[in-house]
Image (cartoon, coloured by chain):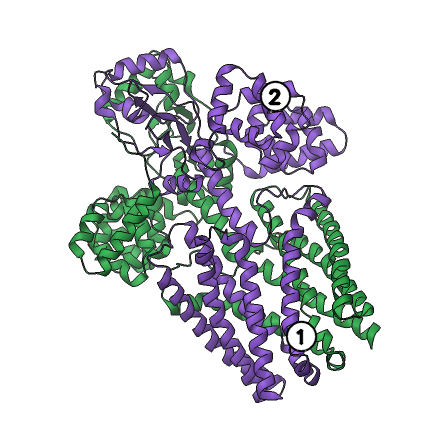
Chain colours: A purple, B green
Amino acid sequence: MPNTFEAKSSNNQLHDINEALGSGQIEHAKEMLHQLQPGDLALLLESSRSRNRLDIWQLIPPDLYSDVLEELSDDVRNGIIRKMLPDKVADALEEMDTDNLVDTLRGLPQEVAQDLLAAMDEQDRSRAELGLSYGDETAGFIMNTDAITLRPGINVDVILRYLRLKGGMPEHTDTLYVVDRNDKLMGGVALTSLITAAPDTPIESLIKDSEAIPATMMDNEVASLFERYNWLSAPVVDEKNQLLGRITIDDVVDIIREDAEHSMMSMAGLDDEEDTFAPVVKSTQRRSIWLGVNLLTALMAAAVSDLFEAALSQLAVLAILNTIVPSMGGVAGNQTLTLVIRGMALGHVNSANARWLISKELAIGFLNGVIWSVLIASVIAIWKQDIMLGAVIAFAMMINMVAAGLAGASLPIIMKKLKIDPALAGSVILTTITDVVGIFAFLGSATWLLM
Amino acid sequence: MPNTFEAKSSNNQLHDINEALGSGQIEHAKEMLHQLQPGDLALLLESSRSRNRLDIWQLIPPDLYSDVLEELSDDVRNGIIRKMLPDKVADALEEMDTDNLVDTLRGLPQEVAQDLLAAMDEQDRSRAELGLSYGDETAGFIMNTDAITLRPGINVDVILRYLRLKGGMPEHTDTLYVVDRNDKLMGGVALTSLITAAPDTPIESLIKDSEAIPATMMDNEVASLFERYNWLSAPVVDEKNQLLGRITIDDVVDIIREDAEHSMMSMAGLDDEEDTFAPVVKSTQRRSIWLGVNLLTALMAAAVSDLFEAALSQLAVLAILNTIVPSMGGVAGNQTLTLVIRGMALGHVNSANARWLISKELAIGFLNGVIWSVLIASVIAIWKQDIMLGAVIAFAMMINMVAAGLAGASLPIIMKKLKIDPALAGSVILTTITDVVGIFAFLGSATWLLM
């Protein structure tokens, strides 16, 4: 009898295991570990401090190694593999699905990967080498080579007898593929139609013209096809339309998760694979590039203010208010930038509507400018009892809001044309623009009108 | 013969259709539209300006209405439904899967939804009312009621004959469910094991103890279970363990995409459902809350600077450098905040490791403080020929980096305990903290040491 699943209790399990490990009750921890599934074990490893991961790994039953390694993120998996004995690694790899095997091998130092390949049997080596021959993040790289294939000219009864003889199917099989004598893909037969068809139905009448994915297609395109057409799996072919393998939805889920996270992490200046529990020095190193770039842009903004030293030394109030306009421009620009980056990721933004989108965001920038100019001018006129100062800050706000809308919408579109990742560099360039424009507009108009 | 699928050509198609519509070649556009699948039509509608959507909708064959509506995002779908004739809406709704039907009804004004429910036939109304009885974002809300159920005591041959008689299966069926005479779930039988088993195998020996999801479980917990255990579908039960329906991976993919986007969009102060092509005024309204909050925090930072007016009016250089320390603190703090929010979303951060994580981020803040203090002190000492000024800014940088690490790690953990969404308000509170601490530390120590 199944019990309803309580996510709470699963978290408590992990908590209890951590407690047991922390207090040295190794046998008790081991007992609890042996009741967990590979997905739970992977979660436990990923939620642990990097130095504790190896202790936990020692307690996991070796026959689960390959399943657990498949579920781990790259960083954590590579950390563990580097500390395992080579023959244990080879054993674990041979049991892996092709996509995870290939992904793991590519994450290892080249000599190690070569040694492991050499130690594999013929069949495993050749499926690994096929995957490795395709670039990172392509369909060929993420496919599995375990598709069940059929030949034309048989009927449902023959297929069913063949499958019973085989006695099992690869995980997540929902479609069998029909290939001709040259291995060229003729189409797919869904398990559901196989089951509901009469035994004497010829295979030809069940074939669906399933659309095949070229092995060189980028994985994010594959993911958007799966999302758009609600596929569970799809065949992968080479340029001659020969069947190479299949991609299943569980791998696509990982790609979707990673792609969506990539934008969020990049916009904050983080590496996607950044492990929350990595050691302090490693984390500091990984984050320093972005802080370095930001220091440069902050110094650039300071240099712009420096041009107006005369005004700043005469009117301290300008120094006090100097951050308001750049800050509002930064927020408005980042809203636009984020929306356009998401729109591009979903495939909504294209050459046909890019110009319209930019003019829409310009109009929003203008409207924002009107609203927040009036508001800030009123606040400053009352706070500092100076209507002229209010007018100056309103003028600067107006200019900067329009600049923010224009930059936020056009930057990602331009960067994509230049093949630069807009999520990675867009935010820092945008903030530099809104800082420089904001300071120039505010201090410049103050010098002109108030001095 | 299938052709390899080119995502490029699909985008071109959409482009061509937009062109044809723009230049008034309605018949040509209609012809092209008729060749598209529901997923393509949904993408076309979502990539179009809101005012053009209804024109495109008129050209879509009515028998595809329900499939296309199922694929649309809430905002776009509701916009279209509100302009459709009520009887057309009712027709389209009756053909929908339960989960989409329920989702659509909940998005409509209550009177409209009531009228539509009243117009439905008995069976459709009762499945809709079951879903509507569960809260938004629960398993009961996103489930489908189309699971195939079997009774115990039969063998594979009987099941296969029954399925052939039925002649088809609901989309994405990979498991049949066995229930007792009180509809209590006994377990699942995978299609793959049904196919590979001998005809005389009793059903009991094929039953897997599939874990059931309680109808009240939150959808993001459901999604993480699917990810962790690589499920394609899962049964949903009520508190008495009676089978209510099933959840399929295609709906889970949408939840994963939305959850990941939610964090990214909220951190930029945007509504997840914000439609890239909404009218200008509506978009401006939706974004104004965040800009208003930011104006308050910018004024608060200005008020802090105002406390040091004496120092600022004597040393204009303080005004010029005043933004550097807050800016670096903001970036460092946002890196930590983003990482912790992601860690919480993936289930990696829990009460067992929260304290350790905060101390790790404090250590990174300290290390960052050392690195960037030394660097900024050197730059300022050379640029402004003032070693004491360099020491002041270095001290302020040190303080602010530690504050950023502490705030970035503890804010989301505290907010989650208070049941506030950290992605939504975390970033603005963090920036306020790093601004205020940075300005206080810089101008305060300058007043103390340089005046």
Residue A166 screen position, x and y as percent: 39, 13
For the residue labelled by badge 2, is the local secondary structure a helix, a strand or a loop?
Answer: helix
Which residue matches tag 2?
Answer: A115
Q: Quadrant of residue A276?
A: top right
Q: Relative to residue B74, is residue A196 drawn left or right?
A: left
Left or right relative to A408: residue A321: right
| Residue at the image point whose x is 69% and y is 42% from the top | B353
Give the distance between the C-alpha atoms of the residues marked 1 and 2, in whole angstroms.
59 Å
For marks 1 and 2 on the same chain, the one whose residue lies earlier in the sequence: 2
> Above or below — where is B404 with respect to A152?
below
Q: Are marks 1 and 2 in contact (CB under 8 Å)?
A: no
Q: Quadrant of residue A360?
A: bottom left
Residue B348 in sight in this render: yes
Q: Position of residue B110 (x, y in %)?
A: 33, 58
Using the image, determine if residue A139 lies above or below residue B358.
above
Placement of the N terminus of chain B among the 4 image quadrants: top left
